[in-house]
Amino acid sequence: MILTSLDIDVEALEARTGWSIRPEGACKGDVCVPLSADAVADGRVSVPRLAERMRMPLLRDEAHGLWALGPESGGRALTTAEAPDLVLPDRHGRPFALSSLRGRKVLLVAWASW
Amino acid sequence: MWQALSTELRPRGLEIVTVALDLDPEAAYRYIDKAAPDHPSLIDSAHVVDELLGVVNVPNGVWIDEDGVLVRPAEPASPGRNPALDSLLSIDTSTLPPHLADTLLEARKIKLDHKSYVVALRDWVANGAESPYALGPDEVVRRSQPRSLDVATAAAAFELGQELHRRGHPSDAVAWFREAHRLQPDNWTYKRQAWSLVDPLQGPTDEYKGHWAKDIKEIGAENYYPPLDLSPGLPD
């Protein structure tokens, strides 16, 4: 997740990473990781606190004033089997929510032009 | 490529959704416009799917059931032989410059078990959770890609590279792409996306130590895709 400051809106965090901030901590599916009391305030998350607790790497590009917060580490790519709530644009730029296909089986295929 | 299978299996309850992992959406549009699929065909220009699902090469497929639960994690996925690719691979290599000939000779050795994949997919569509190919949630997590601190750091480095490229700083992006390649050398998505921004044919460049033919020789082309593991999962 690209950042220009070290505290981020909880909704932006969830939209990009799938981790939601709840009273129990940072949660994805039925997995919750407790956070320290000072990690969340006024709907914003302290990125260094979150990164340390979740073993998320935090890289800095000084020249361009950017940080990148990587995903949680130490386990597998999937924390839960619940599908991420992906919303991606189609060919014409219209957002398409994967969740709109609930009730049907889905084969999601990743490909590339390169 | 997936249209025929989509036409066959949609009436039986399967929706095929393709996602192009392309920093430059225009590059994907050309293929989508030519194929004109009637299934959802999406663009992931930030490579979010790679990170969220553990995709390290393409094509990869993920199965999601009616409740939005993954029943197979990311794995090599193909509906069948690709006539356009087969035609490319059949070019007489003696007519090509050495590095292109090298690339084609290696590409011919790649194995992707599309027949077994399609058999498994049809079985799941017909039998749902009773299909031996539908895995339980714990097994899905277990079979997803490992994520060490290096792998997670590679994701952050790759994202910085993409961001800088998008902002018009391609030479600054290269350093972050190199770092992603160093940290996760078996991630072909990171490599091929970055190489293709310098040379669409992914041959040798001044920017990167590796290139497609060189790196694939190092691992052996037959290992480019891991073998499809269609064994039943352990009980959850």
Image (tube, rainbow, N blue to C red):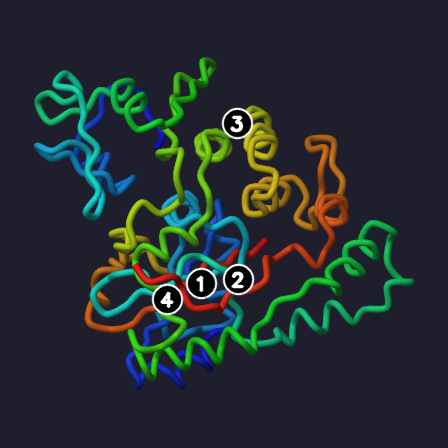
- N-terminal of the two: label 3 or label 1? 1
Give the labeled residue for mark 2.
B76
Q: Residues under labels 1 and 4: Cα distance? A: 10 Å
Pointer 3: what residue? B169
Residue type indicated by callout 3:
His
Q: CA distance from mark 3 to mark 2?
A: 33 Å
**Disc 4 target residue:** B17
N-terminal of the pair, mark 4 or mark 2, is: 4
Identify residue for label 1.
B61
Q: Give the CA distance from mark 4 to mark 3.
A: 32 Å
N-terminal-most mark, 1 or 2: 1
Please state the chain letter of the residue tagged with numbered disc 1 in the rendered image.
B
Residue B228, by quadrant, is: bottom right
Pointer 2 indicates a residue of which chain?
B
Left/right of residue B20 with respect to residue B171 in the rendered view: left
Q: Secondary structure at mark 4?
A: strand
Helix, strand or loop under label 2: strand
For the residues bearing labels 1 and 2, Cβ distance under 8 angstroms: yes
Frontmost residue, A72 versus A64? A72
Q: Determine the CA span between mark 4 and mark 2.
A: 15 Å
* Residue B113 placement: quadrant: bottom right
Q: Are marks 4 and 2 in contact (CB under 8 Å)?
A: no
Whether tag 3 and tag 2 are in contact, CB under 8 A, the answer is no
- The residue positioned farthest toward the front in the image shown: B235
Helix, strand or loop status at disc 1? strand
Name which of mark 4 and mark 3 comes first in the sequence. 4
Q: Earlier in the sequence, mark 1 or mark 4?
A: 4
State if disc 1 and disc 3 touch (CB < 8 Å).
no
Packing grade of label 4 (10 A; few <14, some 14-19, many >=20) is many
